[in-house]
Amino acid sequence: MSSGATTTKRQGNREKLLDAAVRLIEQQGYGRITARDLVAASDTNLNSIGYHYGSKEALLNEAIAIGVRGWIAEMAEAAFSEDAGVGRGQLEASLAAIIERFAERRNLAVSFVEAFPQAVRSPELGGRMAAMFDETLASGAEIFRRGFEQEGLDLDPGHARTLSTLVAAICDGLLLIWLIDPGQLPSARQIMEALAVIAPPPSPTTAR
C-alpha cells in the first residue's frame, strides 16, 4: 500500500471516530460511552483511538466541544432572535423559546450539562467553551441593545452584556431543574412576572 493511501485511510478513521463520538454523545451521553462503543459505531479498531487522539477521553472531549457548540448555537438562535420582539417582550419570548427546546433536544441538553465537569478538568476544552460563550453573549448583547433601543430605551453596552449573561445563566439553571423535575419549571410568563416584582419596568426618560 502506498504512503498516500495509508495517509488517506488514517485521516478517514480520525473523522469516523469523531463523527461516531458526536453521535454517541447525543444519543447516550458522555458518561456511558465505552471505547468499544466508539469502535463499533465508527467501524474502526481500538488502536485507532490511541493513534489519532491519544485516549478515549481526548476523543470525547473533542466531540463534546462540537456538541456544546451545537447546543449553544441552537439556544442562542432561540434566545436572541431578532424576530422575538423588543425590550421585555423580547426577553419573555426568548425564555419561552428556550424552554420549548429543552424537550426537543433532550439528549443534546444532557451532553451540554455533562460537558462542564470535563471542561473544569481540561484547560483546552474549558478554553474552547469559554470562547463559544463569549461569542454568543456578545451577539446576544447587541440584539438586546437594539431591541431596547426600539422602545426608546438607551441600554448601556455593559448592561446589555450583563442582560445577555443573565439570560444565559437563567436558562442554564432552568435546564438543570427541567432535567431533574420538569414539573418544577416555571413558565416564561411566570419568570417575567417575578422579575417585575423586584425590578419594575423603567420609563423611557429614566432608563440609561
Image: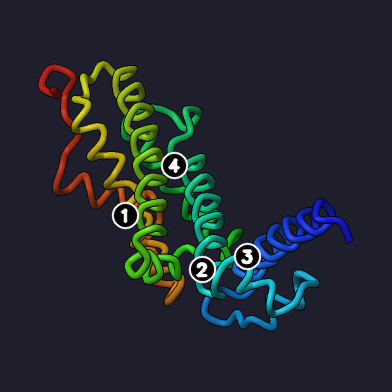
As helix, strand or loop, the secondary structure at mark 4 comes to helix
Q: Earlier in the sequence, mark 2 or mark 4?
A: 2
Q: Name the residue under label 1.
A: 170
Q: Which amino acid does label 2 sit on?
A: Ala
Decide if residue 126 is on the left or right side of residue 163. right
Q: Mark 4 points at which residue?
A: 79
Q: Name the residue under label 3.
A: 52
Q: Name the quarter where the C terminus is drawn.
A: top left
Q: Name the residue under label 2.
A: 58
Dots 4 and 3: beta carbons under 8 Å?
no
Residue 154, compared with residue 1, is above or below; it is: above
Q: Which of marks 1 and 4 is nearer the N terminus?
A: 4
User: How packed is label 3: few (under 14 Cα within 10 Å), some, or many (20 or more)?
Assistant: some
Residue nearest the viewer, comparing 139 with 60: 60
User: In this view of the protein, can residue 178 be seen by the observer?
Assistant: yes
Decide if residue 76 is on the left or right side of residue 15. left
User: How packed is label 4: few (under 14 Cα within 10 Å), some, or many (20 or more)?
Assistant: many
Quadrant of residue 154 in the image? top left
As helix, strand or loop, the secondary structure at mark 1 comes to helix
